[in-house]
């Protein structure tokens, strides 16, 4: 698997961090909505999406930390 999941042209580390934080806030909102009973017919699919998004954000954060140490 490549070290880079995606490339963000012309972005600073601060902009990338801000994007990751916004995506994590969106993930938390989605989880809150699912737990609150919204979209019951889509619950399983949305829960899977939320888990995948959480894993992606975790990996992106790890990669950002690794690149900051270099």
Image (spheres, helix red, strand yellow):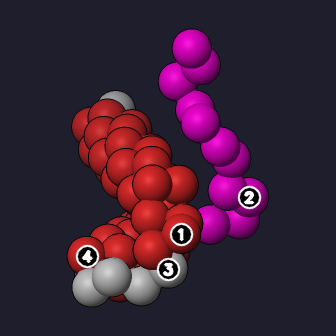
Residue 46 relative to residue 8: left or right: left
Q: Secondary structure at mark 3?
A: loop
From the image, give the main secondary structure of the stretch colored magenta: loop
Q: Which residue is mark 1?
A: 41
Residue where numbered disc 4 is placed:
35
Q: Are marks 4 and 1 in contact (CB under 8 Å)?
A: no
Q: Which residue is mark 2?
A: 9
Name the residue located 32 percent from the left edge and 46 percent from the top edge.
58
Q: Position of residue 67 (x, y in %)?
A: 39, 38
Residue 37 appears in view: yes
Q: How many marks?
A: 4
Q: Look at 25% across and 76% down and name the residue there.
A: 35
Judge depth for marks 2 and 1 and give the one in front.
1
For marks 4 and 1, give the CA distance: 13 Å
Q: Are marks 1 and 3 in contact (CB under 8 Å)?
A: yes
Instruction: Find the magenta span and give its range.
Output: 1-13
For disc 3, the marked residue is: 39
Quadrant for the C terminus, please.
top left
Work out how far the residue at label 2 is from the one at label 4, CA to CA, in angstroms.
36 Å
């Amino acid at each position: 698997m490549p070290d880079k999941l995606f490339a963000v042209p012309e972005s600073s580390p601060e902009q990338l961090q801000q994007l990751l934080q916004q995506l994590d806030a969106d993930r938390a909102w989605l989880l809150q909505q699912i737990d609150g009973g919204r979209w019951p017919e889509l619950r399983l699919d949305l829960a899977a999406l939320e888990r995948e998004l959480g894993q992606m954000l975790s990996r992106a954060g790890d990669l950002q930390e690794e690149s900051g140490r270099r």
